[in-house]
Image: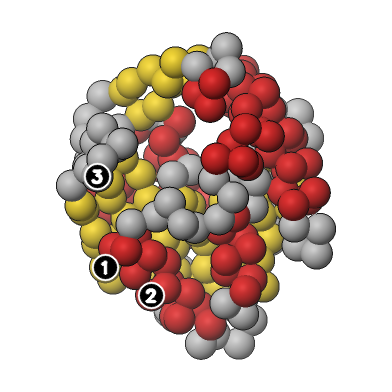
Amino acid sequence: MTIPGKLSDIGSAYDTVAESYASALPDTSFEAAEDMAMIEEFTARVRSTPGRRVIDAGCGTGRMSAHLTAAGLDVTGVDLSPGMVRAARRMHPRLSFTVGELASLPASDGSADGILAWYSIIHSSPAELPGISREFRRALHPGGLALIAFQAGSGSRTMQRPYGHDVELRAELHAPEDVARGFTDLGFSLEAQLVRAARDGERYPQAALLLRKPPADGPNGR
């Protein structure tokens, strides 16, 4: 697929760092206990659905895809970076990964029981979030769940030499209430919210939102 402008630049930067990223973050051991509790809540709820189909949106090199698969879910990983997708396929050859973007997921309407966006919106500006919210609503089955994690705050920061490479990435901070509102305005319910203080090695508070698409057909559902 052809990815334009800013997204192409982000994808290219992650192509450069993909192997170093994979070495630095091979699994879920970096996550705080509170973070994992949110993931396990999401996993348990999606596991109770008949299809158990999850899109790992912004999958990186597949560490969360592997975790969700081990928990019994049917996962497709999607990432903007072809280099990240290649690394994910090499590290997890039995799983499914494809190149795609958050606002245009490679999924048919209502086909997913869950969408995990684990620190995937950090390169999306506040103005870009409504398009992502609408796309998640489109792709989710009625009653489906979205779990979204990000650094909490306002403004942006520049990631200099991420993972030891001579590239630069702009990262956005988001207010949890603003991210939640983008979904609740579309009829989603906010099922759970985590906002925790930064740990050693983290510069900003961390947030995770668990949101549920309305189960009934109508203007806010499918």
Q: Compared with residue 192, is residue 2 higher up or lower down, i.e. above or below?
A: above
Q: Could you tell me if the residues under marks 3 and 1 are in contact, i.e. CB atoms within 8 Å?
A: no
Reading the image, the residue beneath label 2 is: 41
Disc 3 to disc 1, C-alpha distance: 21 Å
Reading the image, the residue beneath label 1 is: 192
Q: Which one is closest to the eye, mark 3 or mark 1?
A: 3
Disc 1 to disc 2, C-alpha distance: 9 Å
Reading the image, the residue beneath label 3 is: 199
Pick whichever, 148 or 65, lies toward us.
Answer: 65
Picture residue at 75% right of the left edge, 57% below the top = 92
Q: Where is residue 194 drawn, in percent x and y?
A: 24, 59
Q: Where is residue 94 drawn, in percent x and y?
A: 80, 64
Q: Could you tell me if the residues under marks 1 and 2 are in contact, i.e. CB atoms within 8 Å?
A: yes
Q: Earlier in the sequence, mark 3 or mark 1?
A: 1
Q: Compared with residue 203, is residue 195 higher up or lower down, i.e. above or below?
A: below
62 relative position to 147: left or right: right
Q: Where is residue 99 drawn, in percent x and y?
A: 72, 42
Label 3 SS: loop
